Image (cartoon, rainbow, N blue to C red):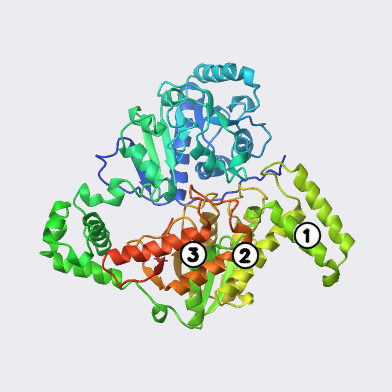
Amino acid sequence: MTQRHVPTTPATQPAPRATIEGPRERERIRTVVVPDHDDLAALLAERVIATIRREVAAKGRCILGLATGSTPLGIYRELIRRHQAGEVDFASVVTFNLDEYYPMPADSPHSYRRYMWENLFAHVNIKQENVHVPDGATPREHVTEHCAAYERAIGQAGGIDFQILGIGKSGHIGFNEPGSPPDSRTRLVTLDIVTRKDASADFFGEDNVPREAITMGVATILEAREIALIATGEHKAAIVRRAVEGEASPDVAATFLQRHANATAYLDLAAAAELTRIKTPWLLEPVEWTPAMTERAVVWLAEQAGKAILKLTARDYSEHHLSPLLAKHGAPGPINGLVFNRLRDKIRGRRKLPSRQRILVFSPHPDDDVISMGGILRKLWENENAIVVAYMTSGNIAVFDHDVERHLDFVDRAADALGVDRPAVRRVRDAVEASFERKAPGAVDLPVVQDLKRMIRESEAIAAVEAVGLPHGAARFLNLPFYRTGEVRKRPIGPEDVALVRALLEEVRPDLVFVAGDLSDPHGTHRMCKAAVEQALGASAIPSPQVWLYRGAWQEWSITEAEVLVPLSQDELRAKIFAIFKHQSQKDTAPFPGGYDDREFWQRVEARNIETAARADRLGLPEYFAMEAYVVDRDGTAGG
């Protein structure tokens, strides 16, 4: 069994900000949208606590239905904090978890039973006999009986008062995959290929993901008195729109929640991005035509009409429900010109980029800098800026074992030339190879292996920064403690992490800081690193630098979201790709590719940078081969 880590939470938590309102006539499920995932955690924890207090007072106990995965972690950490502050008592709480992989030993690092004890139960005063998780170790011949007993236990407890749900990219709730009927009950199911791909990072490869699971059925879930469907991150936006605004269908089990009288979808703004009231609110109600809203609407119109912005006509505006915008300006010409100029001004070649400043780039993993910023980094160096690239985590869990074996073989062969003790090298090599032979998928590596994998990533990072023209001394390796679990799951950001980031900020005293601002990172490291930078900036006494946000390997800022568009020539994009190639351990097949994209990181980057430029060209803007996009974070909340 791997080492357990106690979740830590700040002593105080800021109150959640106001929900984002708008017309809901297209939404078939009550929907609450908040600015950030942290707001969601505070809001849902308060809802759970209110339910516990009400039900315990009314009937002496409260029955909670719980979910696992990354989405509810913030809720559980907030519940722990509130319990430790004496604000909530779990002594009379009974819990039923949605699901468990099958087969799955209870002590496996992938077990949902273990997840719940590590992330909630061990830190509150819940009674062990009140905890129910499907048993993934049940002999196959007894699974049907076990599932029936699970259903009876829920009924004997009086039914679930409050059910927490996540949503998978296929729209599953629990493990009710596409095709699950609305009258289904707790049962053994075969996992959909999309679900297994989504879980592959946790299991260090899709082949290691179990093919089956035990799950509560749709009917069981719908019998809960209150249901909270929770989604965070832009990678959930498309399926959230299907669940909330689409027709009910067995193809998307989450749509069955539309039948429930007390179901609510709780979303951060990123997960809600495709909802009509967020994406195109002018289709539902009069809006305030701010410059940003006007830009969004006109770009949308141009793409709907298949025209360049300066060619849009009055008829285009009226046919696409934008007559109020046309009326405000009197004619299409002034609107078109305003938006065209606004977009054109976002384009910044090298001469319009910062020069002779102190620049600090925070890279969550040792390749995010060149993947996302390989073009601008070279331009900034050519502009005589002093640049430091800070790699926040080691990225060591994303190195295959065979890469370690290959490097050890090299050291063994080169021992005499290097003047090192060959027998000592052989002892280490033998111990490492023996550990690989007995290691289960996803198990924690020996400390020496973790160090070797860290050094592989560091050497690749140095080669990559040199490939974009920076000296090797520009690279700094913070190796933040939150990441050092040896597992995919990480600790929360703590004071030690913030202190290391703050110390670097105070040493460099940057004029400009670059931070990863995306939310699609499959295991949340980008989001956590961004939080560490924000906390360190808030605690630092240095003059506040300007902060630019870039996206990671999964998505790019859209032209309307971006505030800076950096054009790249064909040669500049090729040089950026060559820098990405220096990360050999992530080449060809990466351990954590994310999403459902089989392309390598460099292929995704090439496609998205070319597409950003092509989209600008279709809008009638100056034509370039490729573009990188950035957002200027003025309030510490952009991208999150």
Mark 1 crowd level (few <14, some 14–19, many ≥20, 10 Å Cα): some
Could you tell which of marks 1 and 3 lies nearer the N-terminus?
A: 3
400 shown above or below 159: below
Disc with the residue nearer the chain's start (1 vs 2): 1
Closest to the observer, 588 or 159: 588
Residue drawn at (48%, 50%) of the image: 597
Mark 1–mark 2 CB contact (< 8 Å) = no
Instruction: Residue at 84% x, 67% y: name it.
Output: 415
Q: Is residue 210 above or below residue 460?
A: above
Which mark is first along the chain, 2 or 3? 3
Please provide percent x and percent y for residue 601: 52, 58
Q: Does the residue at mark 1 contact the one at mark 3 (Cβ under 8 Å)?
A: no
Tell me if I can see residue 344 in this picture: yes
Residue that badge 1 annotates = 409
Indicate the amino acid at tag 1. Answer: Asp
In the image, residue 483 lies at what x, y percent?
Answer: 63, 54
Amino acid type at mark 2: Leu
Q: How many neighbours does mark 3 have within 10 angstroms: few (below 14), some (14-19), or many (20 or more)?
A: many
Toward which corner of the image does residue 498 lie, by quadrant? bottom right
Residue 272 is situated, as x and y percent measured from the top left of the image, at 36, 47
Q: Secondary structure at mark 3?
A: helix
Q: Which mark is residue 217?
A: none
Q: What's under tag 3, amino acid-wise?
A: Ser
Distance of mark 3 from mark 2, alpha carbons?
23 Å
- Judged by depth in the image, the label closer to the viewer, 1 or 3, is 1
Residue 256 at x, y = what percent?
37, 29
Q: Which residue in the structure is indicated by mark 2?
A: 500
Residue at figure coordinates x 77%, y 56% from the top left: 448
Mark number for residue 372?
3
Q: Nearer the viewer, residue 246 or 285?
A: 246
User: In this orientation, does residue 633 appear?
Assistant: no
User: Looking at the rendering, which quadrant does residue 167 occupy?
Assistant: top left
